[in-house]
Amino acid sequence: MKITFLGHASLLIETADKKLIVDPFISANEKAKHIDLASLKADYVLLTHAHQDHILDAETLAKNNGAKIISNYEIVTHYGAKGLGGHPMNHGGKWDFDFGRLHYVNAIHSSSFPDGSYGGNPGGFILQSEGKNIYIAGDTALNYNMKIWGEQFDFDLVILPMGDNFTMGYEEAAVATQWLRCKKAMGVHFDTFGYIEIDHEAAIKCFKNKRIELLLLNIGEQISL
Ligand code: NI
Ligand code: MN
């Protein structure tokens, strides 16, 4: 499985034959100008919640590729009204897709659409595919559910927000990684704008002190699992 960081909390996840894009916020990200939205391919678009910095390019990607939107019931219904296909989920539920098993889990955050309308409850995803288990937290605070998921799943990678202010910061993300019983974390939701700038060296050191590897990828950089 390959994971490419597309900036902010946006990811491209590639399994052997499917492409998943998570929380696309590319066209308005000054730091992701070198990512060409029009050339991105996707079979599915996964949305953790309805905030603008997570859904901005979802409609374009879904239309360009005929991709299915996977999110909570309210978000999928919102895009369904625009003629886009989707698969609705809610907290605690799982479904076997053609790319693997996906669980939609709760997050501590909010989830309104840019116009203020209701975007359901915010969430994250646990992806089980090709023998790997990955937690994609979405925007969230540190919370004790992570401890339960750490008992329930054997994680190969956890993808956590760590820019602070709107989500947990890197100190809390390091604790989250311990609670999730994982040895490798990837940071998202940092440096995009002023409120969420972080000191990379301090963050990496904070994780290293807990014997956890922290990946802070450059935008466009890819890792293999
Ligand atoms: Ni948010
Ligand atoms: Mn956000």
Image: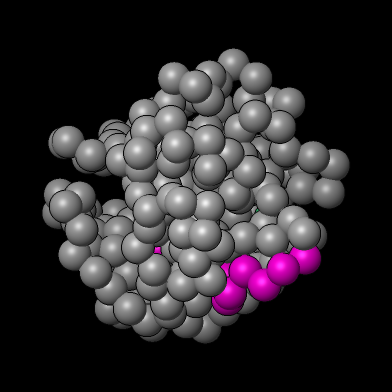
Q: Position of residue 66 (x, y in %)?
A: 35, 39
Q: Is residue 121 magenta?
A: yes
Residue 134 seen in this snapshot: yes
The one of 221 and 174 positioned closer to us in this rendering: 221
Q: Give the quadrant of the N terminus.
A: top left
Prevalent SS, magenta region: loop
The one of 151 and 13 positioned closer to us in this rendering: 13
Q: Does residue 225 lie above or below 148 as drawn?
A: above
Q: Is residue 92 left or right of residue 168?
A: left
Q: Does residue 197 lie above or below 121 as drawn?
A: above
Task: Check the image and name the residue furthest to the top.
Answer: 34
Residue 184 seen in this snapshot: no
* Residue at the (53%, 19%) spot, across then down: 36
Q: Does residue 61 lie above or below 128 as drawn?
A: above
Residue 131 quadrant: bottom left
Q: Position of residue 182 (x, y in %)?
A: 37, 61
The span shown in magenta is 116-126
Residue 190 quadrant: top right
Q: Position of residue 75 (x, y in %)?
A: 53, 64
Q: Is residue 96 magenta?
A: no
* Residue at the (37%, 81%) spot, across then down: 92
Q: Is residue 38 left or right of residue 96?
A: right
Task: Check the image and name the residue furthest to the right.
Answer: 194
